[in-house]
Amino acid sequence: MFGRARLYNLGFAIFTAGSILLALTPGQGEAGAIELVVFRILQGVGAGFLFSNSTAILTDAFPPSQRGMAMGLNQILGVGGTLVGLIVGGLLADLHWRMVFLLSVPIGLAGTVWAYLKLRDTGMIMEQQKMDWLGNSTFAIGLTVLLLALTYGIMPYGQAKMGWGNPLVIAGIISGIALLIAFVFIEMHVEMPMFHLDLFKIRAFAAGNLSLFLSSIARGGLQFMLIIWLQGIWLPLHGYNFEQTPLWAGIYMLPMMLGFFITGPTCGYLSDRYGARGFATVGMLLSALSFILLTFLPADFNYLPFVVILLLAGVGMGMFAAPNTTAIMNSVPPEHRGASSGMRATLQNTGMALSMTLYFSILIIGLAQHLPTAMYQGLVNAGVPAAAAGQVANLPPTAALFAAFLGYNPMAHLLPAAIIHQLPLASQHLILGKAFFPRLIAPAVMSSLRIAFYISTVLSLIAAAASFMRGKRTLAAPQ
């Protein structure tokens, strides 16, 4: 309606404004946390403009014979930027948390200026189309409310260790689903819909988006669970301080990114010649194999097998990503590329968000069942009074998990300082050491991880089947 490049440029400006506000967050404590969330939402709006338009801009700019290569390069640069951000963010976090957001400001400013100078709309602009306000509202509010409810469902509520009994969570889930159902009904009857549901009648478009959504759920959980595994268990057991684990977790995940870098542009280029079905299908099968192999690793694994599995997972992701995106964009008429790109990005990001909620719930349930007993016995054996050990053991597991995830020694935050100082020095060193907490949580975490990896395997296999059913190469003609 307004031009893809114009909205892409605006997205860069909005994202940069959000970064400035985040770096300057004035509040402290709970007020500061709320401000951070609000400013991150603003960043997310800008990122939404970028995600939903970049693929359409590339599709407009390149002929069909070069789109796979273009998508592959675009995606490895996106993944590469994420990787660099993860490592640099880990370094900057040691200086000050504001530096993590401040880094985005000069990059965002440079991107904004460059985009305004260099990008021009080459695609079709449908100026006569009207905004689908009702569809936009029901979708945005419904999805946001649902994801917020699911997020608070994994947080403690009252005496419960999870919040699924929270009336607000229940109301949020029900109202979110109701609004999304209403959205589908609206899109089927409005004259100019936001989501062109008719596009799902195109076999390649429907199969590509279904496999993308399923793979996003599977892969989002993989990356999150591996980070928890590394930061909470493996790295401390191998001598790393908890404060160092956020940085080194990113470094030890490099083999997955390397596999993606190798196959992403290559398979994108080859899909231009031979079609997406074979590459995308095999990519999801390799992803399923990597999930299965991860279930055989112990909590304290040897790094070489882990490297091989990460490489395999990265290769699978690279084989799937660019060919699948290219096939989706090639299957729709040029005038629907903007809407198609937005739908594709929405399904991908929604799948990632649902994945985080799903796998974190599995992890919290496993910890809630097994960690209290292990924590109590471990603390009592270390000399902590039974009453204090029982109090710590019955705290919500999210406290310990988030402490490890953010680079803090969980035991130093869970046990009151007064109790720690009353213990003999040997017991203090044991409890506050690098191995005590990882060995306590390892059985429960590994049990949950294996369940998560089995689910990801099934989702990947279904995604492979959907990808195979996309049919032969398709190239839509303008309407």
Image (tube, rainbow, N blue to C red):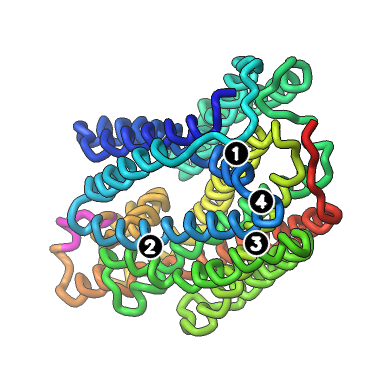
Q: Circle 4 is placed at which residue position?
A: 325
Q: Main secondary structure of the magenta part?
A: helix
Q: Secondary structure at mark 1?
A: helix
The residue segment tinted magenta is: 414-420
> Which amino acid is tagged 1?
Thr
Q: Circle 3 is placed at which residue position?
A: 268
Residue 63 covered by magenta stretch: no
* Image coordinates for residue 462, horizontal then vertical, percent: 77, 56
Check whether the beta carbons of the residues at disc 2 and disc 1 lie within 8 A of each other. Answer: no
Q: Circle 1 is placed at which residue position?
A: 346
Spatial separation of the CA atoms under disc 3 and disc 1:
22 Å
Q: Earlier in the sequence, mark 4 or mark 1?
A: 4
Q: Earlier in the sequence, mark 4 or mark 3?
A: 3
Residue at image position (31%, 47%) is 107
Residue 415 covered by magenta stretch: yes
Q: Secondary structure at mark 4?
A: helix
Residue 13 picture quarter: top left
Q: Earlier in the sequence, mark 3 or mark 1?
A: 3
Q: Is residue 435 left or right of residue 255?
A: left
Q: Earlier in the sequence, mark 3 or mark 2?
A: 3
Check whether the beta carbons of the residues at disc 4 and disc 1 lie within 8 A of each other. Answer: no
Q: Is residue 318 left or right of residue 209?
A: left
Q: Residues within 10 Å of mark 3 (few under 14, many from 20)?
A: many
> Which amino acid is tagged 3?
Gly
Q: Circle 2 is placed at which residue position?
A: 376
Q: Is residue 240 left or right of residue 270?
A: left
Any part of residue 287 in sight: yes
